[in-house]
Image (cartoon, rainbow, N blue to C red):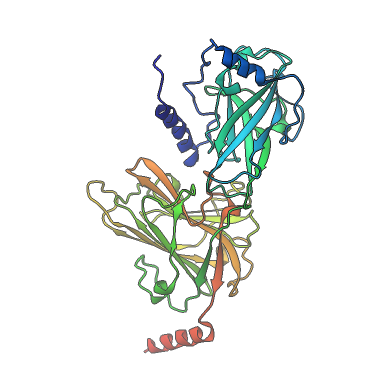
Amino acid sequence: MPRLSRSARLAGARACLLLLAVGAAPLGCRDPHAGPPPRALSPAQRQQVRENTLSSMPTPLFRPPVEPVTLGGGAVRYLGFDAAPLPARRGEPLHIVHYWKAERPLERDWKVFVHAGESGSILDGDHHPVGGLWPTSRWRPGEIYRDAHTVRVPAAWPQATLPLYVGLYRYDDRLPVDQRQAQDGKNRIRAGAVPLSGGALPVPEYRAPRTYEVMQIDGKLSEAAWGSAPVARLVRSDGRGRPTRRTEAKLLWDDARLYVAFVAEDPDVFSTFEADDDPLYEQEVVEIFIDADGNGRTYNELQVAPSGHIFDASFVAPRQGMDLGWSSGMEAAVEVDGTLNDASDTDRGWTVEIAIPFDRLTAVPHRPPQAGEVWRFNLYRLEHLDRKRVEGQSLSPPVLPDFHRPERFARLRFVDEGGSRGHAAARGAAGATTP
């Protein structure tokens, strides 16, 4: 079998990451290169194996939540890991040393996987143990092996710590973790959380002005209030900078409703869904997540497709208790600059204008909001590049491949700079138009 290049191996890894980015949850990424490394070792390599075979029990800094932790019906014990430097630095290498103890012979060769975070792996941490020199089929009962490798901490990792999940896999199979309390239900050991310098990444704040105009929801954004609202530019949801297609958003509010506008650059505007509450998130869509009381649990999700169809749901906790029967009462209008569902021409984009009644949202502290009040929210866009590749965008990047992360929601501050002058202007405008 010909030896594959590093670029080919990385392509396979990226394919696995793409599955996670669009919401798939595979039990394990299929690795066609999981076979054993070469068996003939040089004298220097044999010396390296001896140096990584320990004669006494180590005391790793990071240990699983319960001990002992065994895999494969007690065949292998995971003792924990050390890491350096500490605290780790975003965007820089992190050197990790795992400790494994063989309890019974393993007939097959298993690879080590190392994942970051609950949602999935964004680390290139998969490797053959002991530097690729000593496969698990050679592990001798009673011996302890030092397994060192290096990963790069994601530059935009949002949390103050980097939780690591560890295990052994072969092709599509993971070696079962025997202790339920030590794993996440997917045969991934909760190995420990590495502290990061600088703490958690900050989230942005949007200052939404109050409007005293009568807002007409037609997708045209012709009201003067839209011109004075700050522009929020969405970035890639994985935290890696500017997206391929530009997306800008603005927000306003009044006594009754929250107004949201998206202006999305798009050379091929399409949506084939024909009814509200269809799975719009499977195609191009803009999304609004609102956690009004900021408790990190209850929140609302609202979506609008280029076709003008809407989707709304409420949640009692992140991805839990989804209520599709809940109705936001939102009003939405879409203006397409081009042609919808025609791939033969080049479009310029689409504009969305949305009005969301406060009295329909979950756990709203005050109706209407008070000036200076702060909610948590996020804005998203799913753009299908060439109708194939999916690029996620957000105001506050969740970084992990999951939009349902309230702790990464931006802050929404309600601002009323008009005050009594705004009320007077609104009354004057209303009087001028009254016959």
Query: Where the C terminus falls, by quadrant?
Result: bottom left
Q: Residue 189 placed where, x, y %?
A: 66, 31
Q: Quarter of the image containing the N terminus?
A: top left
* Percent coordinates x, y for residue 151 in the rendering: 55, 35
Q: Position of residue 269 (x, y in %)?
A: 32, 51
Q: Which residue shows up at 22% across the image and 46% down it?
A: 344
Q: Residue at x 43, y 27 (%)?
A: 6
Tell me: residue 185, above or below residue 143. Answer: below
Rendering quarter of residue 78: top right
Q: Seen from this angle, which residue lies furthest front? A: 44
Query: Would you say residue 68 is visible in this rendering?
Result: yes
Is residue 174 visible to the viewer in this orientation of the structure? no
- The mark tally for this picture is 0
Which residue is outermost to the left? Answer: 344
Residue 120 horizontal side relative to residue 261, left or right: right
Asked whether, in this view, residue 223 is left or right of residue 379, the answer is: left
Residue at point 60%, 74% (across, down): 370
Residue shown at 58%/48% (left/top)?
322
Q: Nearer the viewer, residue 115 or 296?
A: 115
Along the line of sight, the residue nearer the viewer: 367 or 101: 101
Across and down, in percent, residue 256 comes to 52, 72
